[in-house]
Image (tube, grey):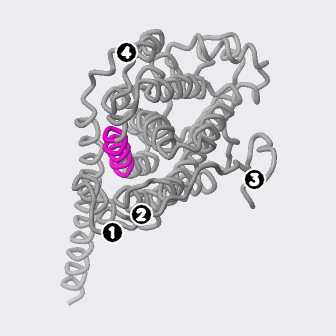
Amino acid sequence: MGTYDLYANDPAGPLWRVPATGAARFTWEYDDGRDRLLALYQKGKDKQWDGRTRIDWDLEVDPYDALGTPEEAMSLYGTRHWDKLSDRDKGELRRHYASWQFSQFLHGEQGAMICAARIVESAPDLDAKFYSATQTMDEARHAEIYGRFLHEKMGLLYPVNDDLQALLGDTLRDSRWDMPYLGMQVLIEGLALAAFGMIRDTTNKPLPKQILTYVMQDEARHVAFGRMALRDYYRQLTDAELREREEFVIEGCHLMRDRLRGVEVLENFGIPRAEAEEISEQSEFLRLFRKLLFSRIVPCVKDIGLWGERLQRAYADMGVFELGDSDLDQLMAQDEELADRLDAERFAAEERERVSEVEAAIESGATED
């Protein structure tokens, strides 16, 4: 069965063609580079992994409760529609919501792969090209993993959300070489990290927890790369050039905020779009979720030097201004530590199992003698 057989809605064509703009840049300096970026490139090489073997795909997943989502977190909870749902309907709603979320992760990872390849092509410095090459491989692995989870464990996908597609298009169509960094590394990756983290820290289901924990270990490096490269470059820009990029960030943040409502899911359960949007906007859980989702973006934007008055007002209006003082380095360090800890726990459990098997075999042999 192909992917098209699993889409809940028609994805409107097999390909989305985004016209390429901007120049491919070659550099003839092969023996120079920023130590921090080269160290990150080395780390990117050292941390490569295989999604087929690091993740335990034998773990069972109940597609009707894939994430252990409580009823209170469902946007329909407490509405007149919720009371009409049978237990079977509620399970199907959970399946659609989880599939919608992970489908957007999947489409975002493909976008990240394409943007990373674009950075290899357009970045003027070799150290940035080197690191972006490792990130392209990371994003390919993430798309592979999310695709496998949706195909094998959920049996359902959703097309790319309109707002995510709009931001991807804006990022890729811009001819300025730094815009794939800004659109992808800071906005899309930053938001994805927060979304991954919220699910990772709340789900009690082992397979999605594994997937999100290991993907986030990679993403922590990617955001660090964007911060380093853009911080250096934006120090050289004029006030007018910085304002242009701040406008891009404001528009992108609005698109990312609106992306998260999952209105398409409610429409598939017979709720008219206008009412579905109203229900989503009134959800207390969604309001909290949205605020937490900007926990990685706002401090990163401030750190790279985009913190003009209009941008600050936009963040104040969104209720996320105070997140600018968050400790981004601590969050990223935690993402990496959690993956290492999960590896250690899994390997320790496997070792205990092997020891138990050996002891049982020895005991069995002694009994037979």
Residue of label 3: 15
| Mark 4, secondary structure of its residue | helix
Residue toward you, 66 or 278: 278
**Label whose residue precedes the other's in the sequence (1 or 3):** 3
Amino acid type at image mark 3? Leu
Distance, label 4 to label 1, CA atoms, is 41 Å
- SS at circle 3: loop
* Residue 349 at x, y percent in the picture: 26, 60
Residue designated by label 2: 27
Name the quarter where the C terminus is drawn: bottom left
Q: CA distance from mark 1 to mark 3?
A: 37 Å
Kindly report which numbered mark, 1 or 3, lies closer to the viewer in this rendering.
1
Quadrant into which the N terminus falls:
bottom right
Relative to residue 313, is residue 105 depicted above or below?
A: below
**Residue underneath mark 1:** 30
**In the rendered structure, which disc, 4 or 1, sits on the residue that comes first in sequence?**
1
Q: Are marks 4 and 1 in contact (CB under 8 Å)?
A: no
| Residue 126 pos. (x, y %) | 37, 61
Relative image position of residue 206 (x, y in whole percent): 41, 48
Gap between marks 2 and 1 measured at Cα: 8 Å
Magenta part of the chain: 217-232
Note whether 24 is above or below 85 in the view shown.
below
